[in-house]
Image (spheres, rainbow, N blue to C red):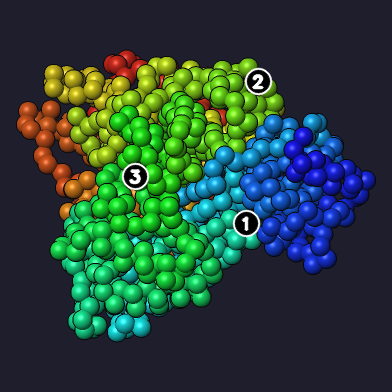
Amino acid sequence: MPMARRSFLSAVAGSAGAGAACTPRTPDDGTDGADGPLEAVAHVGGGAAAAAAARRLLPDHWEQLLFRTTEETDTFHVAGRAGRVTLGGDTACVQLTGLRWYLKHVAHAHIGWAGRQTELPAELPGPGEAVARTADVPHRFALNDTNDGYTNAYHDWAYWEHEIDVLALHGYNEVLVYTGADALYHRVFQEFGYADEELRAWIPGPAHQPWWLLQNLSAFPHPVSRQLLDARAALGRRIADRLRELGMTPVFPGWFGTVPPGFAERNPGARTVAQGTWIGLPRPDWLDPRGEHFARVGEVFYRVQEEMFGPSTLFKMDLLHEGGKPGDVPVGEAARGVERALRTARPDAVWVILGWQRNPPAAIMDAVDNARMLIVDGLSDRFPRVTDREADWGGTPYAFGSIWNFGGHTALGANTRDWVELYPKWRDREGSTLRGVALLPEAADNNPAAFELFSELPWSDGSPVDLKQWFANWAHARYGARDPHAEAAWDVLRRTAYGTTRADSWSEHADGLFGARPSLTARRAASWSPKELRYRAEDFEPALDELLKVRAELRGSSAYRRDLLDVARQALSNRSRVLLPRIRTAYEAKDAAAFEELTRVWLSLVDALEALVATDADHLTGRWVADARAWGADAAERDRLAYDNLSLLTVWATREGANAGLRDYANREWSGLVGGLYRLRWSTWFAELWAALQNGRAPKEIDWFALEDRWTRAPGALAAEPSGDTYRAAVRVRDLLAESPGAPGAPGQGPVRDSRQA
């Protein structure tokens, strides 16, 4: 037995008879708040912070958990007996990762993204033989640059507190924090000749700020208020403080040259490069990193950032993102200027950069200290041509990453076969510089099985992952007990939505056509999504029937309800791809009866989808809008913030940007969108096609952007509370799919002229 494990177990044995668990306080007497000595205190409040998180997550059982701080880096220990489970690790985050392992493998419970199941006995079961796991990489990075927009820029502290606990529970020790960066820029540039009001006009609304921080856009859709900046700064500080408390590192935006308009005129001798536009939106100017003005702003930026949000060692920066223009500035020299400003302010910092498209270019990698960078790779499971990241990036440390959704699409599934094959292969090969994992879906809190499996990659015992067994064990913990129908359902999902690979150059699944701008030839809703399903729809549908057969006593958790909703929703969504080509065939054949029947079926499926997603709080567009409105100080600001948030899911920005491909980029099958905008579009289109058939003419063109923007600005009443029963709604979906295969069937019920289209 390794020495560190012996000493841990000795500490456990020495306190086995004690009755008090670790309380959520920071001890000052050399103990962890329980009644045994610590080997070391690696983080202030390690055991206390973990216990406080456990109290939030398991309010009825946390007192049976004893957290101890140990010396081994990134190693959790699980030991103890029934009613007294001991969890060790060098940080609170690592201790909580041990708790997740215990919950899954011993208590058969689950807390994660999108639902939980914590039907635990009054006395927690003992773990049996002591277990230890060590992370095989030091960097476990979470959240995409787009997360603050597509997950919900208007989440409050209650959301973030839980989200951080869940990320810690899953072993992530580096979390991107963009909240409050608007207030940072606002404060910094007041020292360089800008007034409060003009800076607030330059800063975008919170939902669109991620693309401002990437230097893609500015000043959309409305100026931000001072009270909003102050509130976001306070939340950002609170997020960063909690991460540090749990032994996690907040990853902050670094300084790479984004400046407001007219910087050179106000600061003589400064040199800026205009960046033009990005899909119709003005990009911020870029300050030449080679000059003294860049260094001066950098000094202020990093000083003020630490004053506002506290310390960090990780800073995220992407130069000239997605079409940025270097002008006559050599990119390598620019990179050295950016690095110099960072090192001057933070000598021990790591520069985090995204691996995406052609980023980072060789010009950057050849110019900087690669050993002090971390590339979070967004393409590890996307393109089959990605095989040698050491050669691609000159031996720079990188994190194996996945972007399994773009824009927060609700499509279910991921390339899990690639994860379990490529991650250990790349980690173990000679000369590997794989040093982390990077959880990078563009929106969080979805695809819970994908989240769980990806999070486990660095914490394995070294054995190959058998996905069939993994999904069976997942169903066990997810619902609390073994059930043959649950296992059968997840085996179907393993072979379909979670059985794809990057062989087709996709990492996400196809979105549904109910959310597409109407066209008889539509093949996707978002411009950059797959045009076809990546598995057979008919192979997927049996998962719904199997989940509905799970025994009644296992159906009470939010985990079961969420999975049932996801599978029923996906089955409906997939059917849209079967039905639309038949509608087109009927229309082109001028078969009015068939067209009438098929479009009636289409709208009935839309209505069933709306009823289904309305049963879940996380699928309510009304809640998305209400969250934004809650940050406003008056009615006018509440309206502005509502448009900022809702437009991101619909038109995204201006007409030019929408028509260039941004509209519906973040489409979701959510209540309010499905029964509101999506139904309105399709019923309007079908009515026009029906009229064209009846009158023997071509259909008239419809100004879709005008309709979409009008709806976004005045969507009407949107429910902010769930309604209906998920199980009953899913049964209705199953029955509808059985009755409506997408071919002409029962007699029609009148022409498609819907009263809700106005």
Q: CA distance from mark 2 to mark 3?
A: 47 Å
Q: CA distance from mark 2 to mark 1?
A: 38 Å
Question: Is residue 233 placed above or below 559 in the rendered structure?
Answer: below
Among the 4 quarters of the image, the one containing residue 206: bottom left
Mark 2 touches mark 3? (CB < 8 Å): no
**In this rendering, which labeled residue sits more in front, label 2 or label 3?**
3
Circle number at residue 247: 1
Quadrant holding the N terminus? top right
User: Residue at position x 29%, y 77% from top?
Assistant: 292
Disc 2 marks a residue whose amino acid type is: Asp
The spot of residue 415 in percent (x, y) is 42, 29
Q: Residue furthest left?
A: 697
Disc 3 marks a residue whose amino acid type is: Trp
| Left or right for 608, reference 36 | left
Q: CA distance from mark 3 to mark 1?
A: 29 Å
Mark 3 touches mark 1? (CB < 8 Å): no
Residue in the foreground of this view, choosing between 256 and 468 = 256
| Neighbours of disc 2 within 10 Å: few (<14), some (14-19), many (20+) | some
User: Residue at position x 33%, y 34% from top?
Assistant: 386
The spot of residue 401 in percent (x, y) is 43, 41
Circle number at residue 483: 2
Q: Which residue is mark 3?
A: 393
